[in-house]
Image (tube, rainbow, N blue to C red):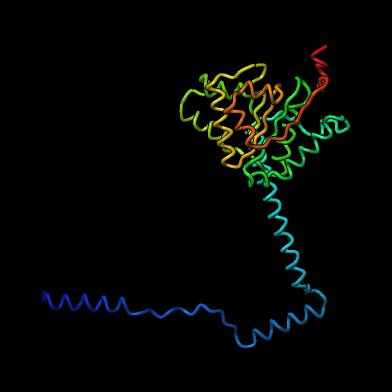
Amino acid sequence: MKKTAEEIAADLNDIARRRRRPRPQKDLSPTAKPGETKQVLNRIQQLRAGGTLPSYDYLELKRQYEQQANQDVQQAQAQAKQRRTERLLAQADLNPEWVFANMDREDPVLGHHIDMAHHFINAFDHWQEKGGAAILIYGDFGTGKSTLAGSIAHDLIYQHQKSVIFQQWASVVDRLFFGVIEDQESRNLYRRALEEVDLLILDEVAANRARLAESQSSFLGHLLRRRRNLGKSVIIITNHDPQALHRAVGDFCFEAIKAFHPVDVALHGPSRRPDIGDYRS
């Protein structure tokens, strides 16, 4: 006999009601049989009395755990620092020989400049807050200009994890003006890196030139102004003294340099490169 629609609906409602009814939960909590807990306690007391149950100093265990955790954190931090240092060194493209350990502190000229360089490094974050700082290193070929700047860069990377770009001015010009970097997007990224890196070192600026091309001088002036606005420091290396550099780069660019109130570092005398000797002899 077929059920009516009302009966079918009633059956469905009954099924749904049974499904909604909470099912009794199985008791999974641990239970001890009568006397079992007492047996365990007695066994523990026997082991302790026999000296076979180790006794724990929980404060000492906690200290050891925290010490190990701190060591793990320090190791992870050291590994992360090492990876970042390697990336920063690759970006900076520095000569590995340009370090203070390879400079003669007993040299009457270098000793004073090395002390100045360490002061610049230690106060680097202060200079950033004040709008950036600049060092103008000038002198003859082989007198240690690049080595001094590179040593500053190495210490900033290793000690302070600062980003550095060390670039010859001719290389900057080739990349931005003569198509070494072909597509515009890559040129824009390179220009932005020059503007935003923590320390920009420009080597051989206007080297052996009485006058920079107007487009290059203008670009350098704008680059330095941009870095000044961002509080980013710069080191300029040249074979011109300040007066000759002024003539070579023009008023617009030289005023951008002077806005940093740069420290002038004059390196003169015979070559300090033992492999080439005095280039003037």
* Horizontal relation, residue 96 to residue 230: left or right: right
Q: Is residue 105 above or below residue 19?
A: above
Dividing the image into 4 quarters, which one contains the N terminus?
Answer: bottom left
> Residue 156's spot in the image, x, y percent?
70, 40
Asked whether residue 164 is in view, the answer is no
Q: Residue at x 83, y 19 (%)?
A: 270
Determine the residue located farthest toward the top in the rendered image.
Answer: 281
Q: On screen, 27 above or below 69?
A: below
Q: Position of residue 59 (x, y in %)?
A: 75, 72
Q: Nearer the viewer, residue 93 or 240?
A: 240
Q: Tell whether 183 sits left or right of 20.
A: right
197 on left or right of 95: left
**Residue lying farthest to the right in this orientation:** 106
13 or 177: nearer the eye? 177
| Residue beneath the point at 56% across and 32% down | 223
Q: Nearer the viewer, residue 91 or 78?
A: 91
Quadrant containing the C terminus in the rendered view: top right
Q: Report if residue 15 is visible in the image.
A: yes
Q: Quadrant of residue 85?
A: top right
The part of the image, by quadrant, that contains residue 164 is: top right
- Image: 216 above or below 149: above
Q: Position of residue 198 (x, y in %)?
A: 62, 39
| Horizontal and vertical percent position of residue 108 | 87, 30
Question: Is 252 located above or below residue 86 in the figure?
Answer: above
Count of labels shown? 0
* Residue 145 quadrant: top right
